[in-house]
Every structure is written in C-alpha cells, then in structure tokens.
Image (spheres, rainbow, N blue to C red):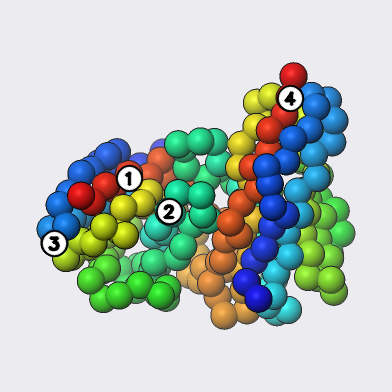
Amino acid sequence: ETGVTQSPTHLIKTRGQQVTLRCSSQSGHNTVSWYQQALGQGPQFIFQYYREEENGRGNFPPRFSGLQFPNYSSELNVNALELDDSALYLCASSEGQGQSSYEQYFGPGTRLTVT
Amino acid sequence: QKEVEQNSGPLSVPEGAIASLNCTYSDRGSQSFFWYRQYSGKSPELIMSIYSNGDKEDGRFTAQLNKASQYVSLLIRDSQPSDSATYLCAVGTSYDKVIFGPGTSLSVIP
C-alpha cells in the first residue's frame, strides 16, 4: 500500500509569485484535503476534493485554488503570495465523501517560505 | 469560544508514567474524534479515532469520549521518551468539517 506523497518538500518564493504544490493520495482513497499549518498551531482546513469536485472549503481567499485529477492526485495553487502564506502545507487522503466521518492520513507536507 | 481546545502545554511526565491529554469541543453535534501525533518538523500521524461514548484502547493508548460533556481525552500509559511530541485533537463537526485543536506538547523525561 502506497502512502500519501507530496512534492516539493521545501519551497522558497517571493511575495507576489505563484506556487503549485502536488499530492498523491493513498492507494484506494478518492478524497484529498489540503491544510495549512502555521508554526505552533493546528492544521487549518483549506479545501477538500472528492472525485475531481471541490467538496467543501475553509476560510481561505480565492487565490487559494485546487484541482483533483482522475487518478485522485491533487494540486494546490496559491496566487499572489503573501508573507503570511509561509507555512507547512499538508495534504491528507481519505476514503469516501465528506470530511468529518473518515480517518485522514497525511503526507509529509511542503514547507513554503515566502520572502 | 474556540471550536476545539486542548490543555495548554507543555506537559512533562517522567518515563513510565501516564500522560493525560485533554480536548473539549463546542459543536454538540460532532460525531467523530481523532488524535494525531506530530513530531517536530514532521506531519501529523493518526493514532486513534473514536466515535462512541466510552473508552477505546489500542496498545498503550486509550481514547475516552464523553459527548454529553463535549470532552475527549487520550491517555498514554507507560510513557516513553519516544512519545515526546505534539498531540493534536481533531473533531468531525456536524457541518462536515474536521477542526483541529492547537495541540499539546508532551515531553517524557527519562
């Protein structure tokens, strides 16, 4: 069984730039959720994708967008980067629609630094 | 009131002792509850999930849920230095979102 993978591991960007983060879900899982975790805080929900459709969104502006592909892998895109976007970005996969009922398994994360 | 709160840390316990981690939540309709362990610089790792009132045991870990009191806890028996980490409580709310608490840092002293 293959676990959740994310790329890249680390990324440094300049304010105003755009970034794309990638995630491959665990084998057998069709749902991917993205979280932002600032230092010393719990993960904050960005959005979830189920079978290529957005299935719920947290309190993040539209410059945070995503995609899910037929193989259930996913991308998180962030436009017009701000300094406060510096954080650990986590992808979690689960089986089944809906966020609250299913166990989520996290990838290793992408550490984004915006300068 | 924050949606998910955890006891403030850091929590220090001697090796071999029981560590008790607590979590309260505000949404009375919440039905699913999860405990994650997060080592420094790493991603969260699922330890336990619990859905019904009462206790659920898995090795040295016991999760306890009391929906009436809106309270969930994690007990770690025979604590080991390798248990030193931040423990995150996550709650599946009635509006189908999983909300994470801020985490409690645990340090097990040899």
Q: Residue A19 appears at what percent x and percent y? A: 18, 55
The quadrant in which residue B34 appears is bottom right
In the image, are marks 1 and 3 on the same chain?
Answer: yes
Tell me the residue that label 4 is attached to: B109
Badge 1 element: strand
Say left or right for B20 vs A74: right
**Which is in the foreground here, disc 1 or disc 3?**
3
Residue plotted at (85% across, 74% down): B68
Q: Residue at x 27, y 47 (%)?
A: A113
Residue marked by disc 3: A16
Of the 4 image quadrants, the one containing the N terminus of chain A is top left
Q: Closer to the observer: label 4 or label 1? A: 4
Residue under mark 2: which chain is it in?
A
Tell me the subunit letter for badge 1: A
Q: CA distance from mark 3 to mark 2?
A: 19 Å
**Lower position in the chain sequence, tag 1 or tag 3:** 3
Marks 1 and 3, Cα distance to the nearest angstrom? Answer: 19 Å
The disc placed on residue A110 is 1
Disc 4 is placed on an element classified as strand
Query: Marks 2 and 4, Cα distance to the nearest angstrom?
Result: 27 Å
- Mark nearer the N terminus (1 vs 2): 2
Residue indicated by mark 2: A38
Q: How many marks?
A: 4
Q: Amino acid at mark 1?
A: Thr
B79 to the left or right of B5: right
Looking at the picture, which amino acid does disc 4 mark?
Ile
Q: Can residue B78 be seen from the camera position used here?
A: no
